[in-house]
Amino acid sequence: MAAMTAALSCLGLGKRYGDLVAVDDVGLSIAGGQAYGLLGPNGAGKTTTISMLVGLLRPDAGTVLVGGVDLAREPLRAKARIGYVPQEIALYPELTGRENLRFFGRLFGLPRRGLAARIAEVLDLIGLTDRADGKLGAYSGGMKRRVNIGAALLHRPQVLILDEPTVGVDPQSRKAILDGLEHLVADGMALLYTSHYMEEVERVCDRVAIIDHGRIVADGTRRELVSLVGGADTVELVLDGDVGAAFEKLRAVEGVSEAARTGDTSVRLLADGGRYLLPSLITAVEGHATVTATQVVEPDLEATFLHLTGTTLRD
Amino acid sequence: MWRALLTVSALELRTRLRDGTAIVIALIVPVTLATLFGLALGGDDPPLRATIGLVDLDGGEFPASVRREVTAAEELKGSVTLRDLPGDREARRALDAGEIGAAIVFPAGFSARVGAGEGGDVTVLTSAGSPLAGVVASAVVDRISAVVDARTLAVRAALLAGVPGDEVKELVERNGAAGPALTLTGDPLAGGKVDLAVYYGSGMAALFAFFVVGASFRSLLTERKLGTLDRMRAGPLAAWVPVAGKAVVGFGLAMVSVCATWASGTLIFGSTWGEPLAVLTVLTAHVLAAAAITMLVAARVRTDAQADGVIMVISFVAAFLGGSLVPLHSLPGPLQTVALLTPNGWTATALAELAGSGAGVSAVAGPVGVLLAIALGAGGLAVLGFRKGMLL
Ligand SMILES: Nc1ncnc2c1ncn2[C@@H]1O[C@H](COP(=O)(O)OP(=O)(O)OP(=O)(O)O)[C@@H](O)[C@H]1O
Ligand SMILES: [Mg+2]
């Protein structure tokens, strides 16, 4: 634990509003360079969890550690490592994009020297260098969203926490935003991401927690989650050679639960971790046939989500 | 942390100045209203009708001469009436009931003791409700003290010179020189004359201080709605920084506002509000109280629109009850007591005292103390409210 301090972790987080349990015993841990997705239907407790993680809301129970620093005990040190992107645009419409960044940069204690350069850097990162000196109120939704993210990056946080950062953004802007986030993660930033868009989470996050009624009902890599539903991958193979002999070899491969011939040259297998099984499948048929085409059809996260929460992500 | 505070303040100031309404509310409206009220209703003579109680337990020449002088003085005709009261207790009761504005109490044997060269003390009872009557009574007593001192000195001198005790009094009085009779020289009201322009000017200053300082706390709620407050709170800065940064600007603008109204009153009407340092002290205490009260409002309501409404109502009620719109002395007695529940009431009382007497800070220590207590109380509740409302 001491050797590998998580960039952000929490344990036993809980919050009640009267009789309503908004968040219950939530725990998670994110390492640097890791992107963690928090998926949940409306009212699941995502924003409440995030509010506690960034110190906006005092938890009824539980602790939050940011790079090993206890948020409750040393809030300023902990907060200095967090970049928070609120669900709604939280900027001054009467200021320009650059002025907004300058304000939050100063507020967050960026040194006077180098502030302008850092702002330019962030503007470049969010692709708004050209439009930086226009009034924010006149920006498009996507541009505002990008400044909303940029303002959280100024002080070079080690953890970036985003609460649905792409709501109401056109596909082009969304792609720009996701590309930017992937770069940050590649550079070692830890990311906590909530979204209503399954494909975004699937693309950006390498670990996902599904939260429902305030509780994390499942958590793991995308594959682990999907396999929770008992959904093994479907692997389709097209073979050339002695298909019959190859078929017998294939069904004996460890991990293959079912196999069926679907045509003269094609085989369908049901396999746990089909994608990773491919090499052993190809090796197995050596000497009898060669694999000329493969297709792995994975059960998707959407189906898992539906299975676990009884709802779809978007209503 | 100071840099963060300055950053918040700078943006707040910039927003307020850009907005334009800040200047209108802080400067143009109060100065204009104060000037208009002053022109329409101000005047040379204060509508002073003071009744001064006279408690004569002495029955000697001093109370008699006070009675004579006050009735004879041209300057006091029609404005000051004397009323005889049987004792100290009755005087206090009448004072509390607002029947008299001040009282002069001569203790038993006063004249005899002065005659014997022992000196003597006259008590003046005043009420915060009518500072002007107090000024007149004090002026009268000042004169009495001068006479008493002179007599005491003369009697002592005569005794030292070997004049037999029972002849001294006669000797001193016959010679007159050493024992001036009690005369009310000049206009004892001169010090107590408060131009109505001062009342209206200070009233407008007191009223608008609420709006000007309140706007800064209101903007805290606007930022909560905008989400920028949460962004600040999630950042590495102390929780009090956003509140304090805005409070500083609200306080500063409100001070500019009250001082501008003060300056314009002095320039336009040539009427003094009193000793400058003392006036500034009272105004500062008032703005602090107004800041704390409007901060308490911001801590208790949910939206900036609600804050607007509540601050508006509180400001006007406090202004009306506290004598900012109608001079305190023209309010009926019970309302004059209610006035003391508002900061405006204490501010009006203190400023009337200063304008009337030319006295310094010590003369208004009481009202200033109350204003600061209001500021501390409301401010404390506001901080608790902010904690609960998760602003802090
Ligand atoms: N201040 C509050 N007072 C009372 N209940 C609240 C408060 N804030 C949130 N809740 C409740 O807590 C639950 C969780 O809300 P939260 O905003 O965390 O959900 P969410 O997962 O972010 O939803 P969405 O996807 O719609 O943003 C909801 O039932 C909500 O009504
Ligand atoms: Mg939410």
Image (tube, rainbow, N blue to C red):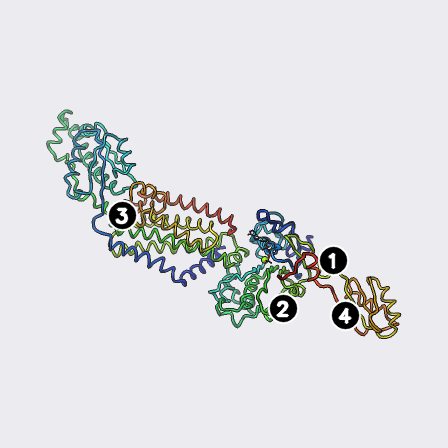
Contact flag, marks 3 and 4 (Cβ < 8 Å): no
For mark 1, does the 10 Å Cα neighbourhood hold few (<14), some (14 to 19), or many (20 or more) residues? some
> Disc 3 marks which amino acid?
Ala
Chain for disc number 1: A
Q: Mark 4 points at which residue?
A: A295
Please provide percent x and percent y for residue A266.
82, 72
Quadrant position of ligand 1: bottom right
The mark that comes first in sequence, 2 or 1, is: 2
- Viewer-closest of B257 and A280: A280
Task: Judge from the rendering whether residue A307 lies leftward or rightward of residue B357; answer left or right.
Answer: right
The mark that comes first in sequence, 2 or 4, is: 2
For mark 3, does the 10 Å Cα neighbourhood hold few (<14), some (14 to 19), or many (20 or more) residues? many
Q: Mark 1 points at which residue?
A: A228
> Disc 2 marks which amino acid?
Asp
Please provide percent x and percent y for residue A82.
59, 58
Asked if B275 appears above or below B94 in the picture, the reply is below
Respond yes or no on whether mark 2 lies under 8 Å from ligand 2. Answer: no
Task: Judge from the rendering whether residue A75 lies leftward or rightward of residue B183; answer left or right.
Answer: right
Q: Mark 3 points at which residue?
A: B355
Q: Which residue is drawn at 12% across and 29% down?
A: B171
In three-dimensional space, the C-alpha distance between marks 3 and 1, rounded to whole angstroms, equals: 84 Å
Asked if B221 appears above or below A263 in the picture, the reply is above
For mark 2, does the 10 Å Cα neighbourhood hold few (<14), some (14 to 19), or many (20 or more) residues? few
